[in-house]
Amino acid sequence: MADTKRILVVGAGIIGTGIAAYLQREGHRVTIVDRLEPGRACSFGNGGGIGVTSIPPLSTPGVIWKIPRWLMHPEGPLALRWAHLPALLPWLVRFLRAGDPRRVKTITDATTAILAPCYEAWAPLFRDAKLDHLVRHSGVIHLYPDEAARDADRYQWRLREERGLHFERIGRDELRQLVPGLTPDITAAMYEPQWRFVRDPYLIVRGLADHVLANGGTILREDVRGFEFGADGVGAVITDRGRHTPDRIVIAAGAWSHRLSKMLGSRVPLESQRGYHVTMPNTGLDLRHIMIDPSGKMGITPMAMGVRFGGTSEFAGVDAPPDYRRTRALVARAKRLFPGLDASGSTEWAGDRPLLPDSLPAIGPSPRHKNVIYAFGHSHIGMALGGITGKLVAELVADRPASLDLKPYRIDRF
């Protein structure tokens, strides 16, 4: 094809492989570069949700008053390594400013726009890579202790309602039927039928990577160390194993992307929102829905390898070692929700989710180099956004009008 380009995608997670698969569909020669094997970083521990309704940003009015309580509780959903606080403070100020009601409206509109087509964008990739068998469409259930707790989240639900998203209230009796084994202390819930989830996030990424390879793509286990610059943009990508000279470069390296964008002249306030999970293979539970525990900020997904309990947000810096006391807090919370569960044989995991202060990703062309495109910062909704991000990047490479207005996601918005 006359328009075929040699494209280097930096990052082999759910975003990078989704981008690579879309670029390949348009006839481009694609190389993925990552220091790890595909799907072995943040995407490995994903909660699996393709949540079209995950539109409220993490910073909302009043969140500042909740932070001290979360930090003081040993099993709370938020943790901070105090040595990291000086580096975190500028980001934290931006995060709190994003919780202004007017900003929340703008951010929520932008998140709604990019999530609305998220599954339709995934569908052709899942079909081509023969991954449909890993996808379930069962909706999501939000679990609340009582009606008062559910009403306390009314701001979040109003954001959804104002944008035409459908949800239903569920009472005690129906909840008992839908979620066997749930503690009787949970008496209220919200159900959103639009959600899908995947039974194994790693197999999704690995399947996309294998599809790219089968169609002539290349995947290299290399660590990007720098760039060479020329009159027409970035002339070469330098790794620990060599030098690459693609026509276009896509930065999709998750929580490490800001280090690469800084080398490329774009400073961006990206933080690692470290999450943890525990996967239990022998719970004895018969769960069929993905669930969210808003009080504990925990997701619950019935996966092929067991039930995954994931969540918490730890701010420690991307280079800090994991603190697996966080997984013990997840186990304790899981046992309170499901008193009869068997936690034997559990595995634990920690991973770095890339979070920008306004909860929106950075997707779009570099303002400094015409052959560089950014695609990172998808926070906790990367599984949902991998397909649509790939589609948008393919449109940028082809110089076609983007399916969405990319202004809210530009890298230089801060």
Image (cartoon, helix red, strand yellow):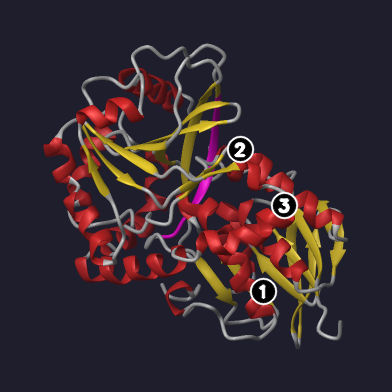
SS for dot 3: helix
Asked if disc 3 and disc 2 are in contact, CB closer than 8 Å, the reply is no
- The region drawn magenta spans 348-356
Q: CA distance from mark 2 to mark 1?
A: 26 Å
Mark 3 surroundings within 10 Å by alpha-carbon count, few (fewer than 14), some (14 through 19), many (20 or more): many
Q: Earlier in the sequence, mark 2 or mark 1?
A: 2
Q: In terms of image quadrants, where is residue 53?
A: bottom left
Q: Nearer the viewer, residue 5 or 322?
A: 5
Say how many tags the image has.
3
Q: Is residue 324 left or right of residue 140?
A: right
Residue that badge 2 annotates: 200
Give the residue drawn at x 22%, y 27%: 173
Residue that badge 3 annotates: 208
Q: Nearer the viewer, residue 296 or 245?
A: 296
Predominant secondary structure, magenta span: strand
Report x, y in % for residue 310.
Answer: 45, 34
- Is residue 169 at least partly visible in the picture? yes
Residue that badge 1 annotates: 394
Q: Amino acid at mark 2?
A: Asp
- Is residue 262 at least partly visible in the picture? no
Mark 2 surroundings within 10 Å by alpha-carbon count, few (fewer than 14), some (14 through 19), many (20 or more): many
Q: In terms of image quadrants, where is residue 232?
A: bottom right
Q: Amino acid at mark 1?
A: Ala
Q: Earlier in the sequence, mark 1 or mark 3?
A: 3
